[in-house]
Amino acid sequence: MDIILFGPPGAGKGTQAKRLVELLGIPQISTGDLMRAEAKSGSPLGEELQRYMSRGELAPDSLTIEVFKARLGQEDAKGGAIFDGFPRTTAQAEALEALLAELGRRVDKVVVIDVPDSEILGRITGRRSDPATGQVYHITYNPPPPGVEVVQRKDDTEEVVAHRLATYKAQTEPVLAYYDKKGVVVRVDGVGSLDEVTERIKAALGV
Ligand code: AP5
């Protein structure tokens, strides 16, 4: 099964993807996580990617597709994957279709997690993660257990969030039209407890 989790920054794509990994036994492929790992490595590619992320702008399609393709080709993604934060442009959607077609696969469902703009800022500025495990928390809605040292993402500031949201509306939301034509889009309400949202996604996927 190949599933796209789609939605604005802070919708809960990463949080829900990790839950689906356990449920479906397929990996999460997050281009944001892949780019942050590349940036952390200090490579020239990572430095370039970091510049886009810091501004809340999309990285160029060519670089993004290269990073994504390398991950899709790994052994654990042979039986399907959960795509988190990819595709974000129509060019990326077309590249994904071609890459999956080579493998005899296609996007089975696009799950849009709907969250109003008014919720997004609080979710993102309150996000923290454990650098050791990658586990994502929220200082109010999903606090880290006592003793766990957490960090904040560099692009989770108020100014960058506003720009990420504008980028989403201008460049990413229009990609839904591409998938609407294929009849694979399902929408779930992303407001509620983490468990409630997981149940809605499971119902939408029929799993
Ligand atoms: P990326 O890392 O993909 O960031 P994003 O899309 O902005 O999404 P987020 O990770 O911010 O949010 P999320 O939906 O995963 O929410 P989460 O589960 O963490 O991309 C970062 C940057 O990389 C981009 O700006 C761009 O520069 C670059 N990039 C990445 N992919 C690219 C691509 N394809 N093309 C070009 N450039 C690309 O939840 C957020 C918070 O809310 C957490 O604290 C969580 O605990 C909390 N939360 C989750 N669910 C709930 C709930 N139901 N109720 C209350 N709180 C909740």
Image (cartoon, rainbow, N blue to C red):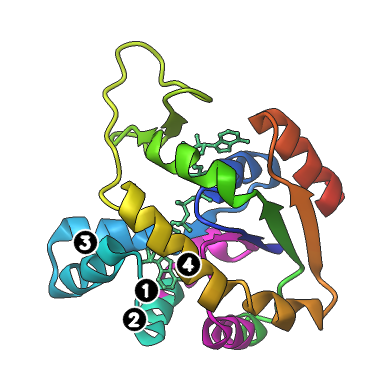
Q: Whole-Å distance between the Cαs marked 2 and 3?
A: 13 Å
- Residue behind mark 4: 166
The answer to whether residue 159 is magenta is no
Q: Nearer the viewer, residue 119 or 104?
A: 119
- Residue behind mark 1: 67
For numbered disc 2, what is the local secondary structure?
A: helix
- Residue behind mark 2: 63
User: Residue at the spot x=51%, y=63% of the render?
Assistant: 85
Earlier-in-chain disc, 4 versus 2: 2
Please state which of the two labelled residues, at mark 3 or mark 1, is closer to the viewer: 3
Q: How crowded is mark 4: few (under 14 residues within 10 Å), some or many (20 or more)?
A: some
Q: Whole-Å distance between the Cαs marked 3 and 1?
A: 12 Å
Q: Whole-Å distance between the Cαs marked 1 and 4?
A: 24 Å
Q: Position of residue 140 (x, y in %)?
A: 48, 22
Earlier-in-chain disc, 4 versus 3: 3
Q: Do the residues labelled 1 and 2 touch (CB within 8 Å)?
A: yes
Q: Which of 165 and 45 is in front in this view?
A: 165
